[in-house]
Each structure stands twice: as structure tokens, then as C-alpha cells.
Image (spheres, rainbow, N blue to C red):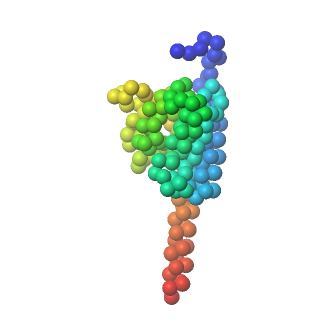
Amino acid sequence: MSNPLETPVSLDEQALKDEDYMRQAMALAAEAELQGEVPVGALLVKDDKVIATGYNLSICRHDASAHAEMECIRAAGQMVENYRLLDTTLYVTLEPCAMCAGAMVHARIGRLVYGADDLKTGAAGSVLDLVRNSAFNHQLSVTSGVLATECGEQLSAFFRRRRKEKKALKQAEKQQGQ
């Protein structure tokens, strides 16, 4: 139920807010990349305030569950002292996987906004749609494709650089062996 004192936000205003928050998530993704992680960033917003952030830490922590969304959800739970994150919006640069989508459903996050589709493991509509599955007791509203090109390019540039680095390392090893 909406608050009668709240000023309704137009679709254009919401789109601008979504882009602003997505740019913040992209900055978090850049922080992940600086640490050698796959550049994915996430932030959770409640009442137009960022209450938690996260970025990928799986490589550094040797933890398959340390995805940007999971880090953000964990931080938010500590912040609000509750695992239920009602009336929040999660912004993430890449479509969530099944693990992260499941955590969002369990946390009762209200809305998911993501940038790039994940055509291999996306669980918000690309491969599966766990966040809107009517068999669950909670479904999220989803807005996809916010700054999708920029988010996708951030990931693509990372993987291009990684492939180039691996190729250069192989060539260097080959030359040392001769």
C-alpha cells in the first residue's frame, strides 16, 4: 500500500533515478575489477537512500557465494538488523544468477533493476525467471536493460583484457622455454 503523502514519481523521473543508481553500481563494479574480480557491482536503495553496496569478491575470498548481490544483501541485513529487506530496490550491473535471485526472493526485495542480460546463467528472465516465479511466496518487480550497453561493455572489456593477458603470459612462458 502506498503512502498517501508520497509524491508519485513519473516514469521519466524513475528512469533517470534508475540510470543514476546504475552508474553508482558501475563504479562499484570498477572497484571489483581493481581487485582482480569480475566487474559486477550492486547497491540497495530504500526511500531514495543507498543503504548497502557490494561488488564481486568471489576470487579474493575463495567463496562462490561472494557475488555483488550477496555482499550487498548481507550488508543491508546488518544495516537494518533484519533479513527482510522490504520496500527496497536492488540495482546490479549484471542479471543475477539463481543463487542471487533466490536470496532476493527470500529477502523480500521489492524491485530488481539490472543492466546487462546474462545469457548463460541469468535467473531474472534470460535463462530462468526465479524472481517472478508464481510458485514462490514473493515475486519482485523487474526493470532490465538499464545502461545495458555500458554495463555489458564494462564486462566485455574486462574479459578481453584477461584473454590478452593470458595470451601474453603463454607467449612469455613459451619464449622462456626455448
Q: Residue furthest top?
A: 4
Is 173 or 171 nearer to us in this picture?
173
- When asked about the image quadrant of residue 14, the answer is top right
The answer to whether residue 124 of the structure is visible from this angle is no
Drawn side of residue 169 relative to residue 136, left or right: right
- When asked about the image quadrant of residue 157, the answer is bottom right
Drawn side of residue 2 relative to residue 97, left or right: right
Image location (x, y in percent) of residue 164 = 55, 67
Q: How many numbered marks, from 0 up?
A: 0
Q: Is residue 151 above or below residue 108?
A: below
Q: Residue furthest left?
A: 135
Q: Is residue 43 above or below residue 173?
A: above
Residue drawn 54% across the image and 39% down it: 74
Residue drawn 51% across the image and 53% down it: 58
Image location (x, y in percent) of residue 124 = 44, 38
Q: Is residue 28 above or below residue 48?
A: below
Image location (x, y in percent) of residue 145 = 52, 39
The answer to whether residue 6 of the structure is visible from this angle is yes
Residue drawn 65% across the image and 17% down it: 7
Drawn side of residue 168 relative to residue 125, left or right: right
- When asked about the image quadrant of residue 33, the answer is bottom right
Residue drawn 63% across the image and 16% down it: 6
